[in-house]
Every structure is written in C-alpha cells, then in structure tokens.
Amino acid sequence: MKAIFAFILIVLFGSLASIFLPWWVISIVCFLVGMAFLDSGWQAILIGFFSVLLIWSVAAFYQSYFNDFILLDRMGKLLEVPSPYLVIVITSILGGLIGMLSTLSGYYLQTINEKRKPKNQYYD
C-alpha cells in the first residue's frame, strides 16, 4: 500500500514540479519519496523507474503531439533514430533511470541507521 502511495506521490509532485522547475527536480522528488515511504530496494527501483518513465513519456508525447512531432523528427534525424516515437522511448527510459537511481539513493540513505540482525541464527 505504501508503494502505491509512493508511486502516486512521485507522479503527482514530479509532474507538477516539472512544469515550473528544471528537469532535474524530478530526482529530488524521487529522493524524498524514496527516503520517506519505501521499504525495500526493489520497491525503490521499480517505483522510481516506472513513475518517471510514465511522467516523461506522457509529457514528451503531449508536447510533441501539438507541434506534429516536428521537433522529435528533427531530433531523430540528428541522432540517426528512424522514428520520432523511438526518441520518446529513449527519453522515457533515460528519465526512468534517473528516477530509479534517485529513489534508490533515498531509500539507502533511510537505511543507514537501521540496526541489522546478525546473520547467525543462534544469537537470538
């Protein structure tokens, strides 16, 4: 349940912050959510990746739709990518990696002060 809440928080605050602030503010949002709400490293990896992937793919498609994909077509020619939709996929995957690393960093900062159980089963 906390994972779904973290996903929704990243999508809401990340998309709102991306409207008014630079692109890298999404990493701060992911870092704070990862530090406050997530319980495992796998949750941080999956939620960070897919939430930012969703934000960036929707934003790239929405902004490109209204200018008839002219900029994406030119960027595709510049990068030698055959389709403007592939530029959206590449952009979304890069954003997902940024979100994944930021959320994972926030989660690991949260776990620094946790007491770890000894690995030996006989110490109970």
Image: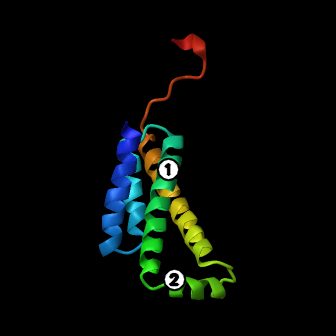
Amino acid type of the residue tagged 1 in the rendering: Leu
Q: Position of residue 96 (x, y in %)?
A: 52, 60
Amino acid type of the residue tagged 2 in the rendering: Phe
Left or right: 78 as drawn, with respect to 91: right
Between residue 95 and residue 29, name the one nearer to us. Answer: 95
Q: Position of residue 25 (x, y in %)?
A: 38, 67
Q: Nearer the viewer, mark 2 or mark 1?
A: 2
- Quote the CA–CA distance across marks 2 and 1: 34 Å
Q: In the rendered view, would you say 40 is above or below 94?
A: above
Left or right: 64 as drawn, with respect to 73: left
Specify few, some or many for label 1: CA neighbours under 10 Å numbering under 14, 14-19, or 20 or more.
many
Q: Position of residue 113 (x, y in %)?
A: 42, 38
Q: In the rendered view, would you say 54 is above or below 8?
A: below
Q: Which residue is mark 2?
A: 69
Specify few, some or many for label 2: CA neighbours under 10 Å numbering under 14, 14-19, or 20 or more.
some
Q: Looking at the image, which residue is at 41% across and 48% down?
A: 34
- Element at label 2: loop
Q: Which residue is mark 1?
A: 104
Q: Looking at the image, which residue is at 65% across and 87% down?
A: 77
Q: Residue 120 falls in which quadrant of the image?
A: top right
Between residue 16 and residue 102, name the one nearer to us. Answer: 16
Q: Position of residue 104 (x, y in %)?
A: 49, 50
Left or right: 123 as drawn, with respect to 54: right
* Nearer-N-terminus badge (2/1): 2
Q: Quadrant of the N terminus?
A: top left
Between residue 108 and residue 23, name the one nearer to us. Answer: 23
